[in-house]
Amino acid sequence: MKKLFISFEGIEGSGKSTQAEKLYKWLNSEGYDCIFTKEPGGTEISKKIRNILLDKENTELAELAELFLYLADRAQHIKEVIEPALFDGKIVITDRFFDSTIAYQGKGREISEEQIRTMNEIATDGISPNLTILIDIFPKKGLKRIKCKDRMELESEDFYKRVRQEYLKIADENPNRVKVFNGVLSPEEIEKDIRKVIKPLLERIK
Ligand code: TMP
């Protein structure tokens, strides 16, 4: 059986988590063996890493320490959840994956993208999504939708502008893998558009 691994990406308030969950529920209702997971926090150990990363008290967290924590979260996630599920022939949907690190730590924090790519390759064991759904939204609009802010969400609008630009660049450079959806549309419209992209992939794995 061919593997299907789908990641959702986007800045805060883009609606990507809502869409990831909608897709998961739909695939399940259609009878597909599917798991829904996320980064950071997709395993018990990863939840502890997530707490460190998003705790507003951790104002002293160094940028490189932040990077390594996201990578550690990913390495654990791959070993414990993603790799075994793909091996079992399941469809894997993850809310965030390696593009988040390139966009947030690479462009947001301005850490060398080349180094991040190398480290991502190690953390993921070379596993890459077949499809990445990027929900695009202007930072001003996305940030307005957030009620309770975590450590990352305290960043400036400029930070999020850089992250968004990087996401769009990644999409430009990887047109076969990354599909961009307009986050301003209604959740129902976005869901419908996402299904259109997914359907041919489902044919492929039958
Ligand atoms: P979430 O709000 O989608 O759960 O994501 C948590 C935060 O972590 C969000 O601000 C994006 C950030 N993040 C990174 O900065 N780098 C990464 O590699 C990942 C996976 C998330």
Image (cartoon, rainbow, N blue to C red):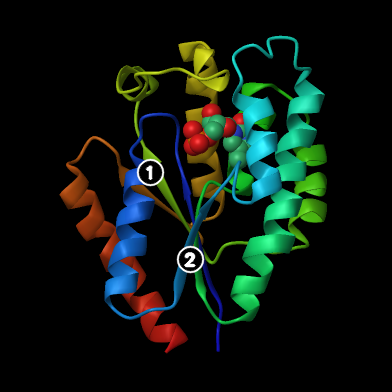
Q: For this view, does 71 lie left or right of residue 183? A: right
Counting residues from the start of the chain, the first of labels 2 and 1 encountered is 1
Whether residue 133 is visible here, answered yes or no, is yes
Does the Cβ of the disc 2 residue fall within 8 Å of ligand 1? no
* Along the viewing direction, whichever of 125 and 176 lies nearer the viewer: 125
Which quarter is ligand 1 in? Answer: top right
- Mark seen at residue 35: 2
CB at mark 1 closer than 8 A to ligand 1?
Answer: yes
**Front residue of this view, candidates 168 and 152:** 152
Q: Tell us which disc is closer to us: 2 or 1.
A: 2
Left or right: 9 in relation to 195:
right
Residue at position x 38%, y 43% from top? 16
Label 2 environment density (alpha carbons within 10 Å; few <14, some 14–19, many ≥20): some
Q: Secondary structure at mark 2?
A: strand
- Residue 163, placed above or below residue 179: above
Check the picture and name the quadrant holding the N terminus: bottom right
Question: In the rendered structure, which amino acid carries the disc numbered 1?
Answer: Lys
